[in-house]
Image: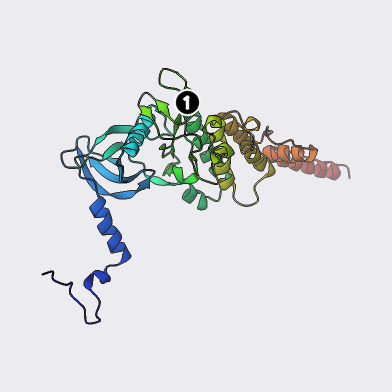
Amino acid sequence: MTTPPPVTPSGSTRSEWLSDAAVERLREAADSPDLTGTRYRLIRHVGRGGMGSVYLAEDTTLGRHVALKVLDLDDPRGLLAARLLREARVLATLEHPGIVPVHEVGRLPDGRVFYAMKYVEGERLDRRAAREPDLPSRLRLFRRVCEAVAFAHDRGILHRDLKPENVMVGTFGEVWVMDWGVAKVLRDGDGGADPGGAGIVTPWGSTDTDHGTVLGTRGYMSPEQERGDLQAVGPRSDVYSLGAVLRFLLGQDPPRPLLAICAKAMAPDPVERYESALDLARDVARHLDGSRVVAYPEGVLDKIRRLYQRHRVAVWLIAAYLVVRGALLAFLGR
């Protein structure tokens, strides 16, 4: 005979006393990976990223903290496991300061696929931007994002899900582009093209992404991604997403040249966008330096305003000199 749960004086069972936070902790404990027999010691759950949960763990062999990304979704056909492994291998090909390195990939004793990567300490770009009032500082962070994406493009890899939530900023201004789970490989390690260009086709296997599949985040994905036109997705699709990230970082009442940069990056027709992420970054750098922005056709007043902003100190020094000189001449001419 089953013993009923204890009843409180009010008539409720003790299980009803559990708060939402307590239930969540119990769920996390039940889902925690079994690290028995591995070199890792679980410390705590960090969050979710793409197809899996991310945990902070200690690498007991090297005595350092690492992040473990572990598949935590039902995967009877093994498709998600293959994609997580592919994500790890994509990251392994991208050795860049702005892309988190992978240390190990494999399966845990409970059968789940995982990979270990550098543990990044910082905050998401959207949260950093919310407390960073200085626009030039936000623009410099954005340029680092562009540089990491440009490096990936040079290696034949598209991100396809660029957004502020997928960028981490470290304590000292380090920038990492995260979550490459829906990346598209345009060519393999030998420089071969992705046959057909639809989905990810690599030496590690093909994905289940077909024509018509929408991959990305609405508000940040390009029109061709919205349509599911995978044949048209290329580096300029990531440029569109970078433009959307830049627009997010600008906040209220941004300068018109920066709005023009966003408009060019986010042009509906890919041909009208910046050719590369580096070209986009260079135009942002021109604005920071006080140079003419390619995307913005400035008029005479715009040029005067820009030159004044760029040489403001010199203008004020010359003006002060002329005022003092005029005062001296007036005094001596009495």
Q: Is residue 119 left or right of residue 133?
A: left
* Residue at 36% from the left image edge and 48% from the top image edge: 48
In the rendering, at what x and y percent does residue 4 appear? 16, 72
Q: Is residue 143 left or right of residue 76?
A: right
**Can you say whether 54 is above or below 290 in the image?**
below
In the rendering, at what x and y percent does residue 138 appear? 54, 44
* Residue at 31% from the left image edge and 37% from the top image edge: 78
**Can you say whether 256 is above or below 130 in the image?**
above
Q: Nearer the viewer, residue 166 or 211?
A: 211
Q: Residue furthest bottom?
A: 9
Image quadrant occupied by the C terminus? top right
The reply to whether residue 136 is visible in this rendering is no
Which residue is under mark 1?
186
Q: Residue furthest right?
A: 334
Q: Amino acid at mark 1?
A: Leu
* Residue at 28% from the left image edge and 38% from the top image edge: 114
Q: Is residue 180 left or right of residue 109?
A: right
The scheme the figure's colours follow is rainbow
In the rendering, at what x and y percent does residue 223 appear? 58, 39
Query: Is disc 1 placed on a helix, strand or loop?
Result: loop
* Residue 276 location, quadrant: top right
In the rendering, at what x and y percent does residue 50 appear? 39, 43
The reply to whether residue 303 is visible in this rendering is yes
Q: Residues within 10 Å of mark 1 (few under 14, many from 20)?
A: many
**Can you say whether 173 is above or below 203 in the image?**
below
